[in-house]
Image (cartoon, rainbow, N blue to C red):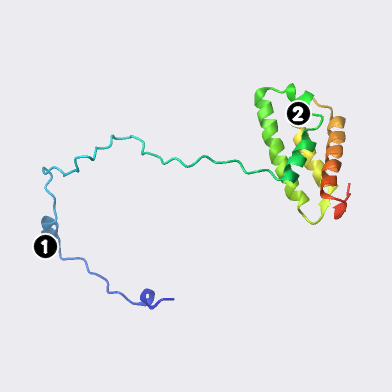
C-alpha cells in the first residue's frame, strides 16, 4: 500500500456562521447577470436527445468449416417442412438452428463426446416444428447426431444411449 493512503489528514472544522455568510456573499453570482456563451454555441432544447455516436457496422464472423458442415447436416431433409412454416416461424427456427449448430460445435471440440448429448440438443431444436410426428423427430435426431459425430472422427466418441 502507498504511504499516502495511510497518512492522517486534518479534519476541517465548519466555519463560524458569520464567516460562512461573508464567504457566501463574496462568491455569490448575481442572478440578473446573463451567462456568456460562445456565439457558435447553441442552447440545447429541453428533452432533446443527445447525439449518439454510431459505430462501424458489425461484420459477421466467418464460419468455420466444421460449423458449416454441422449446419448442412442439420438442414438435410427439412426443406419441405421449412417451406410450410410462417415467415416468423422460419426466422425463429433458423436462428435457433444456428445457435444449436454453434452449441454442437463446442460439444465436438471437447475431448469426449456423448452421442446422447447430441441427440438431445437436436431433438429439442426439431421439436420447434409444428405438427411433426414424435417418432420422426427421434429418428431424425439420431440420424443427424450420428452424421455430425462422424465429422469429428472415430476417436473419443462415447456412444452412450
Task: Please determine whether, in this image, residue 81 is positioned above or below residue 113.
Answer: above
Q: Report x, y in % for residue 64.
A: 70, 45
Q: Give the structural element (helix, strand or loop) at label 2.
A: loop
Instruction: Give the residue drawn at x 71%, y 44%.
Output: 102
Query: Which label was assigned to residue 129?
Result: 2
Query: Which label was assigned to residue 18?
Result: 1
Determine the image quadrant of residue 141.
Answer: top right
Q: Is residue 95 left or right of residue 152?
A: left
Q: In this view, does 73 lie to the left or right of 95?
A: right
Q: Report x, y in % for residue 99.
A: 69, 40
Task: Please determine whether, in this image, residue 83 is positioned above or below residue 137.
Answer: above
Seen from the viewer's position, the closer of residues 117 and 26 is: 117
Instruction: Give the residue drawn at x 75%, y 38%.
Output: 71
Instruction: Give the residue drawn at x 66%, y 23%.
Output: 87
Distance between the Cα atoms at labels 1 and 2?
81 Å
Q: Report x, y in % for residue 67.
A: 73, 43
Q: How many labels does the image show?
A: 2
Q: Nearer the viewer, mark 1 or mark 2?
A: 2
Query: Which label was assigned to residue 95?
Result: none
Q: Report x, y in % for residue 117.
A: 81, 46
Q: Is residue 16 left or right of residue 135?
A: left
Q: Residues within 10 Å of mark 1 (few under 14, many from 20)?
A: few
Q: Residues within 10 Å of mark 2 (few under 14, many from 20)?
A: some
Q: Give the structural element (helix, strand or loop) at label 1.
A: helix
On-image quarter of the N terminus:
bottom left
Seen from the viewer's position, the closer of residues 64 and 79 is: 64
- Ranked by sequence position, the earlier of labels 1 and 2 is 1
Amino acid at each position: 500500500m502507498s504511504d499516502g493512503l495511510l497518512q492522517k489528514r486534518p479534519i476541517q472544522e465548519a466555519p463560524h456562521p458569520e464567516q460562512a455568510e461573508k464567504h457566501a456573499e463574496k462568491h455569490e453570482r448575481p442572478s440578473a447577470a446573463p451567462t456568456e456563451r460562445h456565439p457558435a454555441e447553441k442552447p440545447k432544447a429541453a428533452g432533446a436527445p443527445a447525439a449518439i455516436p454510431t459505430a462501424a457496422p458489425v461484420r459477421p464472423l466467418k464460419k468455420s468449416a466444421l460449423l458449416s458442415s454441422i449446419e448442412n447436416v442439420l438442414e438435410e431433409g427439412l426443406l419441405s417442412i421449412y417451406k410450410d412454416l410462417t415467415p416468423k416461424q422460419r426466422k425463429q427456427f433458423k436462428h435457433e438452428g444456428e445457435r444449436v449448430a454453434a452449441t454442437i460445435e463446442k460439444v465436438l471440440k471437447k475431448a469426449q463426446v456423448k452421442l446422447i448429448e447430441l441427440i438431445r440438443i437436436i431433438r429439442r431444436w426439431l421439436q420447434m416444428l409444428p405438427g411433426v410426428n414424435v417418432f420422426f423427430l427421434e429418428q431424425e435426431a439420431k440420424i443427424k447426431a450420428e452424421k455430425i459425430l462422424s465429422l469429428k472422427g472415430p476417436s473419443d466418441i462415447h456412444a452412450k444411449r
